[in-house]
Image: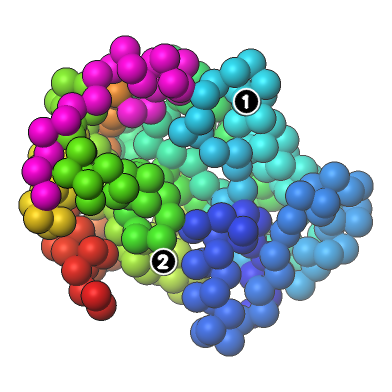
Amino acid sequence: MKIAISGTTGFLGSKVANMFSLQGHEVFPLNRADFSEESDLLASKLDGAEVIIHLAGAPVIKRWTNQHRRDIWESRILTTRKLVDAMGRMEDSPRLFICASAVGIYSDEGRHDEDSTFLSDGFLGRVCRDWEAEAAKAPESCRTVMMRLGIILGKDGGALKQMLPPFRLGLGGRIGTGRQSMSWVHIEDVLGILQFLVGGNSLEGPVNVVSPEVVSNRTFTKVLAKTLGRPAIVPVPGFALRLVFGGGASTLTGGQHAIPARLMESGYVFRFPVIKEALHNILKEGE
């Protein structure tokens, strides 16, 4: 099966491409140059692809200058728009389009399954809404899934890689009040969910890609420190994060409580549903 994947140089995309390649699929990586081409040319490159997985996007945890805000928006919305336009020009539309999104679409208040209407009015919430609106314009013959990703945990990339250095030195601690929710998911479950989606089930529309167990930042911090055998006594105040990241600090001081209702209803079984087991697997197994 030909599977086109964007974002293959990133933490998640590289693992997704490697997984499907090892399974014998023909993986076609989409790069930045492909998105600058005319839609007809991109469509010709995509011809024969049964599945398109769109994971590209500028990093979010970075100082939000006006330029970086534009980069965050354009790298998601404009590339999705180009892909959808190209799909409409293909001789045969793909049977499945999986587009990344994020739980940042939800409000920081309350608990959210995929039917929640309590959405964020913040910058990232608006980006996610625009992102999903573009993905929803894919051809009707193509099943479309918007993966509302939580914090992806893995040893060699993502948020955890950035957290580990201070924690290993015993300098880790909660962020802000520590009360904010952390909807997380083990990288192996993200890969498993992608296989589950490609494998022929009927899920479509928004899907919360998060573990069933949501924890507070304070709890996550304690479990991470205990797993490493280090103290966690150096909290990071919100004002310090705002000095470094500007508006981007809200991604660290806020958080959403998302529930993977549709995945659980459809029969997906999480490999790592509990944070203690997930962190032990990432940090201890294979040492």
- The amino acid type found where label 2 is placed reads Leu
Q: Which residue is mark 2?
A: 191
The main secondary structure of the magenta stretch is helix
- x%, y% of residue 229? 9, 55
Q: Mark 2 packing: few (<14 Cα in 10 Å), some, or many (20+)?
A: some
Q: Is residue 12 visible?
A: yes
- x%, y% of residue 204? 47, 52
Q: Is residue 239 magenta?
A: yes
* Residue most extreme to the front: 169
- x%, y% of residue 31? 74, 56
Classify residue 98 as left or right of residue 158. right
- The quarter of the displayed image where residue 24 is located: bottom right
- The amino acid type found where label 1 is placed reads His
Q: Is residue 218 visible?
A: no
Instruction: Please tell me the numbered disc located at residue 68.
Output: 1
- First in sequence, mark 1 or 2: give its number: 1
> Which segment is the magenta one?
230-252
Residue that appears at 53% across and 84% down: 22
Residue that appears at 62% across and 58% down: 9
